[in-house]
Image: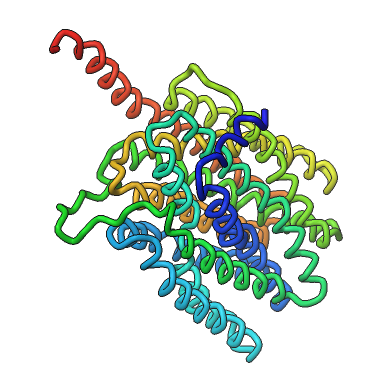
């Protein structure tokens, strides 16, 4: 199984940019939980914790496509330094405001700033893989590797953040800022694998969000992100309600561990079913798994459920990003991938905010209704995406069949 992944690193420079991106995106799994633990420790309320997590995630998602368009136009090495500077300024301001015991609502602005300036690292590294593996069959395996590495971070990150929070609630966020800084410096240095920028003289390409399939993918990712945000905050609240707050990171790690395992297997296989067909099936399965959360009576059982539900994450994300790469022109790929990432971010923000309010007013167990509702949305929107993408695949098949005749 691992031989297919090993082949990826025969490409010069691939190991270096993959490692740099891994460091830079480690905070993906640290910032949301870090904000929840930090705010709830100060106020004892999950409502504000969920809202501020939503502010961070939503600002990141809203600005990602715009920043992605700048990256396509000017290159990654030109955009990374100013984005890092703004990100750190917002992060430092957040910590300073918090330590001054300012009203909790005043954290919203600096949180939005460092969220907006945190580059969508997943789109940067996937664009690099698409560039160095252009036209090669290994690209699907590369996207699988990225999904597995994401989930590895979601295994290690939550445990790390919750452990540091036992010492001080802000330590997890401070370490996350250190990771962003180090990873940004390392990734910018790898110009050998950077996709070429598009000169000012070249015609502007229409935004990928105008493509119907990208619209459908973005909406589908909103519901998938809704599952992530609501399930994660819900599991933290459930652990806290059962006197096991210190184990909340373990629950989130189980979520990521299940996804990592399925991603490893998925990426090592060759699939006959079309990308669109796989996406529909995976969305239906992932949506159907969410009601399992309501059946869990205790923290250990929630951990098992999180592991099972997590199995549906990586294959769905891998196929979604693969579909995006298939339908978006290369000159706008970073922006296209960013739109899909925006869907995840907006969904995560909405899900985490909604479940925080539900937990505060109706209890931790009732909060699991939110990921169940999001799961229904996942199933319906992946079917919608399949219908749109299937038309494109059918048109491509017809063109291929007609090519010899035209010749």
> Percent from the top left, x then y, of residue 149?
62, 47
Q: Position of residue 223 (x, y in %)?
A: 49, 44
Q: Residue at x 49, y 32 (%)?
A: 138
Furthest toward the top, the residue is 405
Q: Position of residue 99 (x, y in %)?
A: 66, 88
Locate residue 406: give its quadrant. top left
Q: Is residue 405 above or below residue 278?
A: above
99 vs 302, left or right, is: left
Q: In the rendering, at what x and y percent does residue 27 appear?
A: 61, 62
Which image quarter is the N terminus in?
top right
The residue lying toward the viewer, choosing from 37 and 296, is 37
Residue located at (62% from left, 67% from top): 179
- Answer left or right for 43 relative to 282: right
The C terminus: image quadrant? top left
Q: Residue at x 55, y 39 (%)?
A: 10
Which color mode does the image show?
A: rainbow
Q: How many marks?
A: 0
Q: Nearer the viewer, residue 234 or 148?
A: 148
Q: Is residue 205 above or below residue 166?
A: above
Q: State whether residue 317 appears in this view.
A: no
* Residue at point 43%, 38% (across, down): 133
Please indicate whether residue 393 sits to the left or right of residue 48 in the image.
Answer: left
User: Quick check: can you spot residue 308?
Assistant: yes
Where residue 20 sits, quadrant-wise, is bottom right
């Amino acid at each position: 199984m691992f031989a297919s992944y090993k082949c990826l690193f025969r490409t010069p420079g691939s190991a270096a940019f993959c490692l740099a991106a891994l460091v830079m995106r480690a905070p993906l799994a640290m910032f949301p939980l870090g904000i929840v633990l930090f705010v709830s420790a100060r106020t004892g309320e999950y409502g504000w914790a969920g809202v501020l997590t939503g502010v961070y995630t939503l600002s990141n998602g809203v600005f990602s496509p715009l920043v992605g368009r700048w990256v396509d136009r000017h290159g990654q090495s030109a955009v990374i330094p100013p984005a890092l500077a703004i990100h750190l300024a917002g992060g430092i301001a957040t910590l300073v405001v918090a330590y001054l015991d300012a009203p909790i609502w005043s954290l919203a602005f600096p949180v939005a700033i460092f969220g907006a300036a945190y580059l969508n690292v997943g789109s940067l590294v996937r664009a690099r893989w698409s560039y160095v593996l252009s036209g090669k069959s290994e690209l699907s395996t590369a996207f699988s590797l990225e999904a597995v590495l994401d989930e590895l971070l979601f295994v290690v990150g939550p445990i790390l953040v919750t452990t540091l929070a036992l010492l001080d609630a802000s330590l997890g966020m401070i370490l996350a800022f250190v990771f962003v800084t180090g990873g940004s410096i390392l990734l910018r240095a790898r110009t050998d694998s950077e996709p070429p920028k598009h000169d000012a003289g070249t015609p502007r390409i229409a935004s990928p969000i105008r493509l119907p399939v990208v619209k459908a993918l973005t909406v589908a990712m909103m519901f998938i992100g809704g599952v992530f945000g609501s399930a994660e905050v819900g599991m933290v609240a459930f652990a806290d309600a059962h006197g096991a707050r210190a184990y909340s990171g373990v629950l989130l790690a189980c979520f990521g561990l299940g996804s990592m395992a399925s991603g490893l297997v998925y990426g090592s296989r060759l699939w006959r079913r079309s990308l669109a067909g796989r996406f529909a099936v995976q969305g239906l399965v992932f949506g159907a798994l969410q009601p399992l959360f309501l059946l869990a009576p205790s923290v250990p059982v929630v951990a098992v459920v999180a592991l099972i539900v997590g199995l549906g994450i990586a294959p769905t994300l891998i196929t979604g990003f693969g579909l995006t790469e298939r339908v978006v022109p290369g000159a706008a790929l970073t922006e296209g991938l960013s739109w899909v990432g925006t869907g995840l971010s907006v969904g995560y923000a909405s899900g985490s905010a909604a479940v925080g309010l539900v937990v505060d007013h109706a209890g931790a167990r009732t909060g699991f209704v939110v990921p169940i509702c999001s799961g229904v949305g996942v199933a319906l929107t992946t079917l919608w995406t399949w219908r749109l993408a299937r038309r494109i695949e059918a048109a491509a098949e017809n063109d291929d069949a007609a090519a010899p005749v035209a010749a």
